[in-house]
């Protein structure tokens, strides 16, 4: 069943990417991080959106780890020269917070999950430290 779901996701990704509707960046993330409740390993990731409205996919480039997250659109004042991921950090735990694509004013912000709230209170940090990882230039 998991194999079938993986194949369906890959087919949807391929169709969406060839249709030109998807946005995709490649980014090296040097630390493990949480995406929803899932702990994702450090590694090189493809970050893809635009296939299903409100959903963002993260897949390691070797396809050993993958997950999807629901996110809402956010806007910033200026276009970025490079795509980037924004993480919230509490101690040694990081949570994906925003996804930005190169040359676009709109990005995505993930919805806060209870796990992040619990971590912030356990660490006595109401405000997270913010870490930004830049996408690879192509």
Image (cartoon, grey):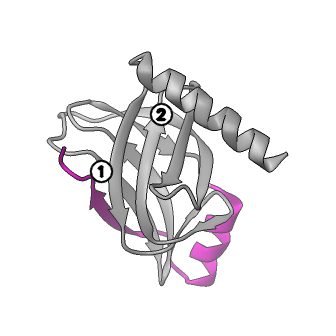
Dot 2 alpha-carbon crowd within 10 angstroms: few under 14, some 14 to 19, many 20 or more: many
Q: How many numbered marks does the figure carry?
A: 2
Q: Is residue 129 left or right of residue 135?
A: right
Q: Residue at x 59, y 60 (%)?
A: 65
> Depth check: 113 or 68 in front?
68
Dot label at residue 43: none
When asked about the image quadrant of residue 77, the answer is top left
Q: Is residue 132 magenta?
A: yes
Residue toward you, 118 or 100:
100
Residue occupying the point 53% across, 22% down: 15
**In terms of secondary structure, where does tag 2 sit?**
strand
Left-right relation of 138 to 2:
left
100 inside magenta stretch: no
**Can you say whether 4 is above or below 64 in the image?**
above
Disc number placed over residue 49 in the picture, else none: 2
Q: Nearer the viewer, residue 51 or 53?
A: 51
Q: Answer with left or right where residue 100 lies relative to residue 64.
A: left
Position of the C terminus, as image quadrant, is top left
Mark 1 = which residue?
Answer: 84
Query: Residue extending furthest top?
Result: 19
Closer to the camera in the image, 28 or 1? 1
- Rendered view: 70 above or below 32: above
Residue at the (43%, 21%) spot, across then down = 18
Disc 1 to disc 2, C-alpha distance: 13 Å
Q: Quick one: SS at disc 1?
A: strand
Is there CB contact under 8 Å for labels 1 and 2?
Answer: no
- Give the image quarter of residue 104: top left
Provide residue 58's location: percent of width, then percent of height: 51, 49
Region rendered in magenta: 113-138
């Amino acid at each position: 069943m998991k194999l079938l779901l993986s194949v369906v996701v890959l087919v949807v990704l391929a169709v969406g990417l060839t249709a030109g509707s998807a946005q995709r960046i490649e980014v090296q993330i040097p630390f493990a991080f949480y995406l929803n409740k899932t702990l994702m390993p450090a590694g090189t990731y493809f970050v893809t959106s635009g296939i299903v409205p409100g959903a963002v996919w993260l897949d390691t480039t070797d396809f050993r780890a993958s997950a999807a997250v629901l996110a809402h659109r956010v806007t910033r004042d200026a276009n970025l020269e490079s795509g980037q991921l924004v993480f919230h950090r509490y101690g040694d735990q990081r949570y994906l917070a925003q996804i930005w694509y190169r040359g676009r004013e709109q990005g995505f912000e993930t919805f806060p999950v209870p796990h992040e709230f619990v971590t912030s209170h356990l660490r006595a940090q109401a405000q997270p430290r913010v870490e930004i990882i830049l996408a690879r230039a192509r």
